Every structure is written in structure tokens, then in C-alpha cells.
Image: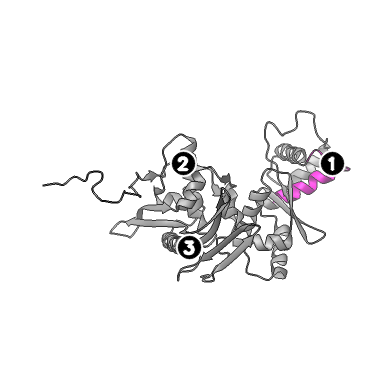
Amino acid sequence: MTRQLVPGSGLLPDRHPTTDMFLCDIFDASPKGDLGSMEHPIFSLSTRPDRRILSYAHNDARIEVTPSVKGRATIHDKDILIYCVSQLMAALNAGREIGRTLQLRAHDLLVATNRDTSGDGYARLKEAFERLAGTRITTNLTTGGIETTRGFGLIEAWEIVRRTRGGRMISVSVTLSDWLFRAVQSKAVLTLSRDYFRLRKPLERRIYEIARKHCGRQSEWRVSMAVLHKKAGSAAPIRVFRAAMRKMMEAETLPDYIMSEEPGDMVRFDRIAVIEADTAPGPGEGPLLTQGTLEAARALFPGADVYGLQAEWLAFWAGTGKKPLRDPDKAFLAWVEKRRKRG
């Protein structure tokens, strides 16, 4: 005989009903990062297990990040969250129903985040899930003038299904934290460059996140080296951090932005404008370049479409406010050299 539960029978309500699993099946979804973790230094920049408790306070925000014995989740572990957020946002924009629990193919995640798909790549994926699940965050939230302190993990649960022979992952399911899922629902996310996943150094990824969050679509953004050091969450002394920033400026590997140092220990980020219909100069507009300059650009950047470079540079010039140039040809060639280094 089967009993049926009826309302008012003395049982507590089911506060966490099982929801349908969201299937990650959107090809080429644009990478998305949540504003909260882009703003604050939640993830470790260390390449070794980081078991230190991070305490961070800036303006009215206070955050404490406590790692597990496996160490704090790293900025490379964040690739998993970026992939999940990207899939959910693409589905949301397409009018599909979404949920906190996602089912995905490990191979798709590895390919989308530019990771190795060998056996080691799958093993590292498992380790990343363990760090994400074990890292706990305590932060203060203010709503309606009332401050609430709460704690949560980056992900709530995860599961890997393997084949019995060969040990290859068939599928992975992950349940995101309510905090991260609410960010998706409220669309508190930003689109990231696909080249983000090509950045090798953890600090490069973190600096790109900060620039994307604070510079956004502005033509430029300035910040003191001390504040940038704090927001990056770097454990290195500021003199070491400053040296790393200078190397990053020379390498010019940061997608979308060019970094430079200014007097007063300041760092400036200039956005590299992309060609858009509403910002690109019209035909005949903008600084004129000589044919000799275009030939010099072709020699500087072999294989590149110099007319495409010219159009991109004009869009960049328009994005900086169409400032008058004393020597447009020289400015263009200097920009082409920087563009060539970025690839």
C-alpha cells in the first residue's frame, strides 16, 4: 500500500525541490564573467596549493575566502564557472528555461576554454572541481539598508560519470551556488574576450578581468598601482607587483586593452576599439595616411591586411575621442607595431 503525503500532515515544506538538469548544448557561446568575482579577488593567483585565508575589504565590501585542504580555487579553475555562466546566459537570451544544475560534456568544456584534452587535462578538471567545491566565501551583503553576512561555496555539488573501460569522462554535472546563479538571472555579467583563455599567467587573467570590469567600453581608465595591487589579490610585495605590471605593459598580451604607466604611480588602460557600425569613421573621415605608410605597415606586419589594420586603427582613433594627431602616419605605424605583438 502506497501512502500519499497531504498538506498539513506535519512535514516541513520541500525547500529545495529537484529541478530539471540544464543541458549545456550551445555551441560557441560567448564567454561571460560574473561581476562579483571580476570586482573582488576571490580566486588564487598561485600555481601551488594556496591554503591561506584571504581577507579583503574595499569601500563597503568585505570578503573572506577560506580554502579547503586542497587549496583555494585558482583563477584557472574559474574557467569552469565562466563556461557554465556562458551557457546559461546564451540559453536565457534565447528564451530557454535554466537551472542551477548543469550537465555538460567535459570535452566541450576543455575545448571552449582552450585546455588540453589529454588524460592529464581530464585529471586537472577533477582537481578543479574539488577546489571549487571546497572554497568557502563569507561576505556582507547590503539590501534595503540592512547588512547581511552569509557564507557559501563557489559550487554546491559536482559529479563525474566515467566509462568503466578507459576511465574517460562521459558527462559532468555541476550545481552552481545560489549566489552565482542569481548573478546570471539578474544578468550581472560581462562578455569576455575569447583570448582570455589564451592568457597563460594567472596575473594576466586577473588584470584583464579588472580592466574589463572598470574600463568596460570607456576609451580609458586610470587606477593607482596600490589599488590595482589590492584588487588583483596579489600576495607579492607591491614592488614585485609593479615590476610584473611593467613586464605586462611591454609584452602587450592583454586582450582589448593597452596598459601604460603614468606619473604618480598610476596605471592607465586604453581600450582597443573594435570596428562597430556606430563608432567607425565613415568613408573619407579620419586622419589620412600616405601609400608609403601603408607599405611600411605591410612590412611591419607581414601577412596582415593593411587596409583592415587601417580601418581598425581609425575605429581606435574614433574611440579615443577623435583627438587631432600631429603625425598620423607615425601614430599609425606605432599602433601597428603594438598590434603585431598582440597577434
Depth check, front residue: 76 or 1:
1
Q: Which mark is residue 328?
A: 1
Q: Amino acid at mark 1?
A: Pro
Question: Nearer the observer, disc 2 or disc 3?
Answer: 3
Q: In the structure shown, which secondary structural element does the residue marked by tag 3 occupy?
A: strand
Q: Amino acid at mark 3?
A: Arg
Residue 119, x across and y down, in percent: 41, 61
Whether 113 is drawn above or below 217: the answer is: below
Within-10-Å neighbours for mark 3: few <14, some 14–19, many 20+: many
Please report contact status of discs 3 and 1: CB closer than 8 Å, yes or no.
no
Q: Is residue 137 left or right of residue 331?
A: left
Q: Is residue 323 magenta?
A: yes
- Residue that protrudes farthest toward the top in the picture: 283
Q: In the structure shown, which secondary structural element does the residue marked by tag 1 occupy?
A: helix
The tag earlier along the polypeptide, 3 or 1, is: 3
Residue 4, x across and y down, in percent: 18, 45
Task: Look at mark 3 in the image and give the residue it sits on.
Answer: 136
Q: Is residue 330 magenta?
A: yes
Residue 112, x across and y down, in percent: 49, 49
Question: Nearer the observer, disc 3 or disc 1?
Answer: 3
- Distance, label 3 to label 1, CA atoms, is 52 Å
The part of the chain drawn in magenta is 321-340
- Distance, label 1 to label 2, CA atoms, is 42 Å
The tag earlier along the polypeptide, 2 or 3, is: 2
Q: In the structure shown, which secondary structural element does the residue marked by tag 2 occupy?
A: loop
Please report contact status of discs 2 and 3: CB closer than 8 Å, yes or no.
no
Name the residue: 42% across, 51% down. Answer: 107
Name the residue: 70% across, 53% down. Answer: 341
Question: Nearer the observer, disc 1 or disc 2?
Answer: 2
Task: Look at mark 2 in the image and give the residue it sits on.
Answer: 27
